Amino acid sequence: MRAARLINLVLLLQSRGTMTAAELAAELEVSERTVYRDVVELSSAGVPVYASQGRTGGYHLVDGYRTRLTGLSRAEAEALFLAGLPGPAADMGLGEPVRAARLKVLAALPPGLRDASSVAGQRFHLDAPGWFHDPQTPPLLVSLAQAVWQDHELTMTYRRRDEVTRTVAPYGLVLKNGTWYLVGRVKEDLRSYRVDRITAVEPTGATFTRDPGFDLPSFWAQRAVAFVRQMLRETITIRLSPDGVRLLRFAVEPVAAEQAQAEAGEPDPEGWVRTRLPVESLDVAYTYMMRLGPEVEVLEPPSLRARLGEAAARTAQLYR
């Protein structure tokens, strides 16, 4: 464990430049005292780690020092070739750099690990688009990816019910279930846009400064949950059989299923539970309940209960 930590410390300094003891301790999940000891050990082993004082001080490697990837284990080397999606990378115009990087990593690996790429490729394949989805690469994706890499501000035309024009600082791109989204800052707000609805982009000629505290995965996770919760404007009251409880997560939005399970009461003598389920609309709720069939009973609202009762009667008539 200590040897791996020392390698990680060197790689952190190599990739990020100067880092304080507190920053290194947070990244390595150790105490600052442990960082001090590790730096002394690295210096004793000939690794040129130096400390600088002052407001912008910290630990850094002597200019030009590079380490090789000789510290990779087999598991790490195999995992490395699963750390990206070649298809989406090619969609963004990065297919050739990704191929070149893979070749360079393979060349740097020791002979015993050079089969890591084929081992991983034979065992795992990541297919990003969802079923019944014809993956179309948005025509402006490459231009947006270049702006994201280079921190170039854009003037963007976006299609909603009408077309609007925005000046946006493109922070990142997200691929969600086969659909690309742009996360960008408009004035002081961070917003997300479907890339296939962007009809035109034009660089403004300016660059922008990123918020150093911005984290794209965290932002997207929070925004995705908030988006789903915002859509769930109605609530229905239902009874679920034991099978209905098990099947609910396959029939409705995960956020809605979690809330319904959290609010579920104690099972009755037949094992049925009563709960409240958030839904986008009563029309959507009707579709959800039809999926569950006889494993659910709608108690409220009366209009939805009557609609499902009529559907059940028509179904019974068909099979009589």
Image (spheres, rainbow, N blue to C red):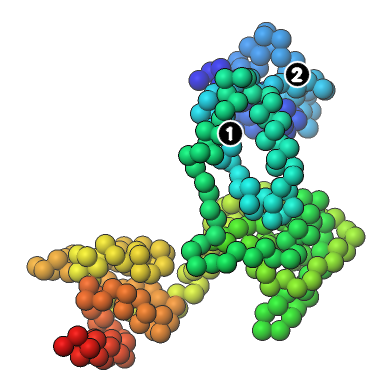
How far apart are the alpha carbons under marks 1 and 2?
A: 36 Å
Relative to residue 31, is residue 86 depicted above or below? below
149 left or right of 222? right
Q: Residue at x 79, y 56 (%)?
A: 147
Relative to residue 46, is residue 2 depicted above or below? below
Q: Residue at x 14, y 66 (%)?
A: 271
Q: Amino acid at mark 2?
A: Tyr
Q: Which mark is residue 50?
A: 2
Estimate the x, y position of residue 197 in percent, counting from the top left. Answer: 68, 73
Can residue 191 be seen at all in this image of the molecule? no
Q: Amino acid at mark 1?
A: Ser
Q: Residue furthest top?
A: 44
Pointer 1: what residue? 117
In the image, 246 versus 301, the foreground residue is 246
In the image, 36 versus 79, the foreground residue is 79
Q: Residue at x 51, y 62 (%)?
A: 130
Q: Residues within 10 Å of mark 2 (few under 14, many from 20)?
A: some
In the image, 268 versus 22, the foreground residue is 268
Estimate the x, y position of residue 86 in percent, counting from the top left. Answer: 63, 47
Estimate the x, y position of residue 209 in percent, counting from the top left. Answer: 80, 52
89 left or right of 240? right
Q: Tell me the element at label 1.
A: helix
Q: Residue furthest right?
A: 205
- Rendering quarter of residue 273: bottom left
- Rendering quarter of residue 294: bottom left
Quadrant containing the C terminus in the rendered view: bottom left
Q: Tell me the element at label 2.
A: strand
Q: Residue furthest left?
A: 269
Q: Residue at x 71, y 21 (%)?
A: 67
